[in-house]
Each structure stands twice: as structure tokens, then as C-alpha cells.
Image (cartoon, grey):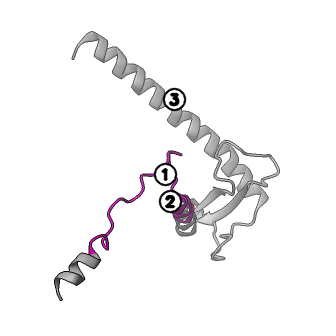
Amino acid sequence: MSDKKQKSQQRLDDVVAKARRDSEERGHGYREQALKLYPWICGRCGREFNRANLRELTVHHKNHDHDYNPPDGSNWELLCLYCHDNEHQRQTEALASKGIALDGQKAPSATFNPFANLKDMLDKDK
């Protein structure tokens, strides 16, 4: 690998590592705060948690912005792993139904029309 490629790869590795560290820091801050504010119960299915299984209780951002963490917890709800995954899947599907991809880009629309030649096919069978 050339020196230029190595430097570029190292810069990329540094950026990714920093992003992971920052995300981890951010996560621990609001997670700890949310666990102090709210009872350890999933806001959807009602499953109760204790210290033994608390790692399965997650903090969901109601507006889907992980950087918006008001100290009063108004953008958070505690959800179990399963309900949290379901919530994000519902969000993904809602965006897709509007033609929006997860990255915010316009999703490509379908171009295949299975009934395009239906009349010709029906006429052909006569």
C-alpha cells in the first residue's frame, strides 16, 4: 500500500474510532439519565426489568434524533430490545412509503409494470 493510501486509511480509521467513542459517551450519558428518570419498564409491551436484565432495556429517541437529549428526558422512552427494533422498522417503512431512503435521498421508484402488456396478451389468446 502506498504511503498516501496508508495515511488516508489511517485518517479514516481515526474518524471512525472518534465517532464510535463519541457515540458511546453520548449513549452512556443519556441512558444513565433515562434510567434514573423512568421506571424500568418497556413503554410498549410493559415488560419489567431488573439489574440482571437491564442491558435489554434501551433508550429510544422519540424524534429519532440521537443528538437531541433534553435533560428532562422528554425525547426519550425506555423500550425493550424487541420493541425498539420494531419502532425503528416502522419508521423505516413509513419513510419508504413516502419514497424516502434512510439516508434522506429520494428512493428510486419502481419501473416494472407487470400489467403493461396485459391487453396484448389477452387479445393474443382470443
Q: Kindly identify the amino acid type of the residue bearing the numbered disc 1.
A: Ala
Q: Calculate the distance from the C-alpha at mark 2 to the C-alpha at mark 1.
A: 6 Å
Between 53 and 96, the one lying in front of the other is: 96
Q: Residue furthest top?
A: 3
Neighbours of disc 3 within 10 Å: few (<14), some (14-19), many (20+)? few
Looking at the picture, how far across and down is residue 81, in whole percent?
54, 64
Q: Which image quadrant for residue 59?
A: bottom right
Main secondary structure type of the part rendered in magenta = loop
Which callout, 2 or 1, points at the residue further toward the start of the chain?
A: 2
Mark nearest the camera among 3 and 1 is 1
Q: Which residue is mark 1?
A: 101
Is 86 a magenta residue?
no
Residues rendered magenta in the picture:
88-117
C-beta proximity under 8 Å, tags 2 and 1 = yes
Residue 96, disc: 2
Q: Which image quarter holds the C terminus?
A: bottom left
Q: Nearer the viewer, mark 2 or mark 3?
A: 2
Q: Name the side, left or right, on which 83 lies relative to 7.
A: right
Where on the picture, by quarter, is residue 58? bottom right
- Against 99, residue 46 (above or below) is below
On the image, the x and y values in percent for residue 109 come to 42, 56
What is the three-letter code of the residue carrying label 2? Answer: Ala
Residue denoted by label 3: 18
